[in-house]
Image (spheres, rainbow, N blue to C red):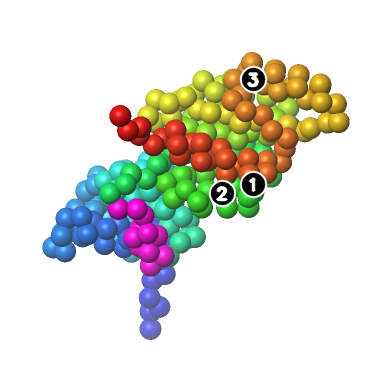
Amino acid sequence: MAKPAVPRHPPSACVWRFCYERLQDLRGADVRERELGQILGFEHARAVRWKEGNMYLDRAELLLTLSEHLSVPPGLLVRLAAGRLSVKDAQAELQRRPRGKAVAEAEVLYVSSEGKPAAFEAALRGHAGFTGWAASDAAVGLLTAGEHRPTLAFVEAAVAGGQVFSVVRALSRSKDAADRLCRVVVGYAASEDGEADRRIEAALGMAGAAACHPFPFTAQVLDDELRRLAQRLTPRKD
């Protein structure tokens, strides 16, 4: 007796189910399944493979398109596609979003030798619309920034070595999808020589760093910067 086929990528099927049920909420229960595939420009066969979990739906541009059409935070879809969130939990998280109030959305980059630390992930959880990206070296960090266009970037100076000023300059001159300049926060190895540390901070500031702190970044620094970003993205009332 033939064994039932095993999906190649079950999380993609979860993304499909979550997005289809979200589309039903927005357009009515009689919406057709093909309408979801049409959002991404999928032909019927490809849409079926997505539904069955037999294709990888983890490309940033596809998830961002779904996010825009379905009014869902991109970070939530990223976690679904990565298998870190169930459909039930994603629906519950979406229900907890404030009604009638826009949720600030932004891409946040973290470049350091420690990858994506727990403190950074914990800070991000307090901001549903923020999506975090991590890079373990400067070159990958710049490539990631070019692809995802962050509004905020945390950079460990040591990981960039002698290229730190060039890296900071490049990031600080980059813009996010809404044409906002990226805010760059640099972490450096503090010494017992306060004057030397001030010179380092001044040089990094000249290169484009908006703020400098001893590395590793504390939970307070991460939270303060993410709160600042949320305030920056919140429309001002006249």
Position of residue 93 measured from the top left corner of the image (x, y, whole percent)? 40, 60
Determine whether the residue tagged by mark 3 lies in a helix, strand or loop: helix
| Residue 220 x/y as whole percent | 63, 44
Camera sees residue 179: yes
Residue drawn at point x = 53 percent, y = 28 percent: 183
The residue at 64%/16% (across/down) is 206
Relative vertical location of residue 223 with respect to residue 163 in this rendering, above or below: below
Q: Residue furthest right?
A: 192
Q: Amino acid at mark 3?
A: Gly
Question: Residue 51: x and y, percent?
Answer: 31, 61
Q: Alpha-carbon neighbours of circle 1 within 10 Å: few (<14), some, or many (≥20)?
A: few
Q: In this picture, which residue range is highlighted in magenta?
A: 88-99
The type of residue carrying mark 1 is Ala
Which quadrant, please, contains the N terminus?
A: bottom left
Majority secondary structure of magenta residues:
helix
Judging by the rendered image, the residue that carries numbered circle 2 is: 123
Q: Quadrant of residue 11?
A: bottom left
The residue singled out by tag 1 in the image is: 219
The reply to whether the magenta stretch includes residue 116 is no
Q: Residue at x 48, y 32 (%)?
A: 151
Q: Marks 1 and 3, Cα distance to the nearest angstrom?
A: 22 Å
